[in-house]
Image (cartoon, rainbow, N blue to C red):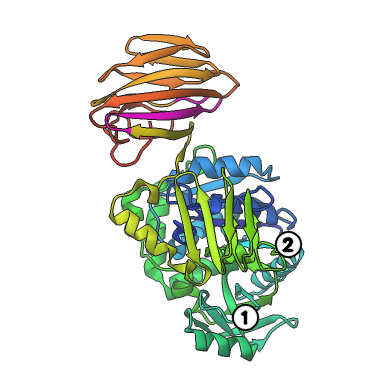
Amino acid sequence: MSMNLVPVILCGGAGTRLWPVSRESMPKPFMRVSDGHSLLQATARRVVGLPGVAQLAVVTNVAYSYKVAEDLAAADLPWPVALLLEPEGRNTAPAIALAALWAQREHGKDCTLLVLPADHLIQDVEAFQRACAQAIELAAGCASGRLVTFGITPTGPDTAFGYIERGEPLTGDNVFTVKRFVEKPARQTAEQYARSGNFAWNSGMFCFTADACLEGLQRHAPDVLDAARATFESAGTRSAGGQIAFDAETFAAQPNISIDYALMERADNVALIACELGWNDVGSWKAVSDAHESDAQGNAAVGPALLMGSRNTFVQAQDRLIAAVGVENLVVVDTPDALLVAHKDASQQVKDVVAHLKKSGAAVAVEHATVHRPWGTYTVLTEGNGFKVKRIHVKPGASLSLQLHHRRSEHWVVISGTAHVTRGEESVDLGPNQSTYIPVGVKHRLANRTSLPLEIVEVQCGDYLGEDDIERFSDVYGRVPGASQSGRTAP
């Protein structure tokens, strides 16, 4: 058993099949599951029982760094966490190559990587940890360096997953060589695979030493490794608070390819662990529905919901009661600004809804009604011609950037807490039921210098109220000072 284990969590993807809960600004890994934890937190907590963990690494987009840090701090993990921050989404091969290079530098070439997507549900944690122990032994105990993949024993035919055909037995009754990887099959082919008993679902979980991973990439995908090295070396050896941010220009040169294509399908030293973990990749609302216990009519519900005369229906409610009467095979998901109603068999097509919304420029495709930022959150309460009203929460000790707006003024009313307001050359502290006015073109900053949350209501007035009407002058979150920031960026 390796005493130098580095779990690597891949925390990315837009999760468009799980809209409207998963959106580009707050994707699937941050979704809460039935126990109140996010999928990311559940993934991290799942490896707590494994021996020899030296450090946890999370590969994620730089835009999610604050949220990843928040979630993992709340998970109360027993070891340090490193964040490897990508400037844009790529694919799993570049992400894993960068993680392997980092782990080799920090923990030596013989450290063992356990690569886990951040968006899986696993009900049988004990079975998962037994499979991990086998994988670690295979990866670390083999002189040639096995590349280990976890295959899930199918519970039936499913066209949403890739498949792995197992070869000859290795050690134990559930470890095999790999005969071939198969792309997501047609229904008839999936049924044949399920009947044969010789195929497993490709889980996207892997285990190998840093050395074996890098040597395999050098042999089978040198372009991936060369680009990763250039990106890694440009980041230097320094990290801020356990975070390494990769350079956008060198990162953009990396191939967009999965680790399956780049390495696992080409290598001849791959081992398959066939396991039953109560695994769910949470890839669609039907998958979410299947992860919840249903009643005698096949119904399941989260939140305030009433199902009458309905069958095989899943309802996820949030702030209001959802009543489903006399319906069958539906998924109903309600959020403050969007409602999804879909047939269960069409739940994979939700991504097409998101594509349509993005093409039309609808913010609801990307942002939630409540938008999370490093300093807190804001919620648009109402808006109309020439005005917008927001509720803003600022975390204790946090502050927004020093900024100005060219086309709108702002009125701030403190609801609770104490607001430290900078307006032009003056600064003032405001308490509940006190207010201030920020004219167009005046530099200003909102800060919470206390240990308690701050809540204000902001009323914007102007001929343009887009979030891109902002010019920043200083900012503690690394957003470019002294330049206008375009796109859907918050204050």
At 50% from the left and 13% from the top, the residue drawn is 433
Quadrant in which residue 488 is drawn: top left
Say the numbered circle drawn on residue 156: 1
* Left or right placement of residue 345 versus residue 171 in this view: left
Q: Nearer the viewer, mark 1 or mark 2?
A: 1
Quadrant in which residue 77 is drawn: top right
Task: Describe the element under mark 2 as helix, strand or loop.
Answer: helix
Q: Quadrant of the C terminus?
A: top left
Say the numbered circle drawn on residue 8: none
Residue 353, position in %: x, y? 38, 60
Residue 37, position in %: x, y? 65, 48
The verdict on residue 360 being magenta is: no
Q: What residue is disc 2 on?
A: 125
Query: Quick one: 113 or 490, which is closer to the camera?
Result: 490
Magenta extent:
384-399
The verdict on residue 386 being magenta is: yes
Q: Is residue 293 visible?
A: yes
Query: Quick one: 60 or 324, which is closer to the camera?
Result: 324
At 33% from the left and 53% from the top, the residue drawn is 250
Mark 1–mark 2 contact, CB under 8 Å? no
Residue kind at label 2, given as amino acid type: Val
Residue 313 higher or lower than 432, as above or below: below
Sort mark 1 into few (<14), some (14-19) or many (20+) by Cα contacts within 10 Å. few
Query: Quick one: 431 or 375, which is closer to the camera?
Result: 431
* Left or right placement of residue 480 versus residue 200 in this view: left
Q: Name the N-terminal-most of marks 1 and 2.
A: 2
Residue 276, position in %: x, y? 70, 73
Residue 435, position in %: x, y? 43, 13
Residue 143 higher or lower than 25, as above or below: below
Q: Is residue 87 visible?
A: no
Spatial distance from mark 1 to mark 2, Cα to Cα?
A: 22 Å
